[in-house]
Amino acid sequence: MDLNIIGKSVIELVKEVGSFIKTEGKAFNRSVVEAKGTNDFVSFVDKQSEQKLVKGLSEILPGSGFIAEEGTAGSNGEEYLWIIDPLDGTTNFIHGVAPHSVSIALQKNNRTIFGVVYELGRNELFYSWEGIGVFCDENEIKVSTAQSMSDALICAGMPVNDFSRLTGHLQVVHKVVTSSHGLRRTGSAATDLAYVAAGRFCGFFEYGLSAWDVAAGIYLVERAGGKVGDYSGGNNYLFGREMLAATPGVYNDLLLLLKENM
């Protein structure tokens, strides 16, 4: 299997699906949005985008399995597994707000070997696979060189339907706001992680996430020189529904805050 050939094919597919999303977004009517749960929305754009991705990725790598947000396809122990979010930041999308993105990761025997995040608001493509570096469009990227919280810009997600840990989360937010360059919240975890990989954010943390939100972004961060962990510093961050990703210089500071408050 040649990952360079696969990568180029996936990038073409992602751009095609991204063009569909952007076209539909220009005249999107919020009346067609469905609620899967509290503040958890889906539209025909999510569903059709996922169908296009599953069809295209199945042609690029026949016999592969899927973990896909809208359940278009599944997995049954396949060697190769795509983890995809057809539209990360759906709430942003339905309100006409950036960022929102397409996120695709590929695993071989449970090890991620490929990641692409296509952010549609700024039309930026972040990607990496084994054998190459990490790129934003044609430019190679690395995580920030910040060595302390006092030099860092941090991003945090906010829970949308699981508020059981909100008090502790807000305590961490308060401490970050008062000890750093500031805190941002974009509404797209895939984009947040891509921005950490690119050195724009020095750290990102959120709980309540699913694998499709973060699989590609985690790969980008780690390959760009960042550190990723769960809130205890362990490695249960892909399926554990909580994660911290940061440049090495601020990772331990953020981890300490999460351990103390979450």
Image (spheres, helix red, strand yellow):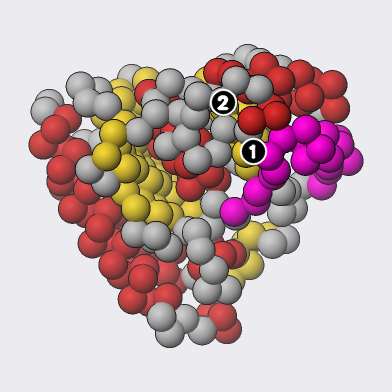
- Image quadrant assignment for residue 164: top right
Magenta span has 176?
yes
Left or right: 88 as drawn, with respect to 54: right
Which SS class for mark 2? loop
Q: Residues within 10 Å of mark 2 (few under 14, many from 20)?
A: some
Q: Position of residue 204 (x, y in %)?
A: 61, 36
Where does the C terminus fall, quadrant-wise? top right
Task: Check disc 2 and report the residue beneath it.
Answer: 146
The three-letter amino acid code for the residue at tag 1 is: Ile
Q: What stretch is highlighted in magenta?
A: 163-186
- Image quadrant assignment for residue 5: top left
How many marks the image carries: the answer is 2
Q: In the rendering, which numbered label is found on residue 154? A: 1
Left or right: 78 as drawn, with respect to 204: left
Q: Residue at x 38, y 23 (%)?
A: 223
Left or right: 20 as drawn, with respect to 87: left
Q: Residue at x 63, y 15 (%)?
A: 234
Which of disc 1 and disc 2 is earlier in sequence? 2
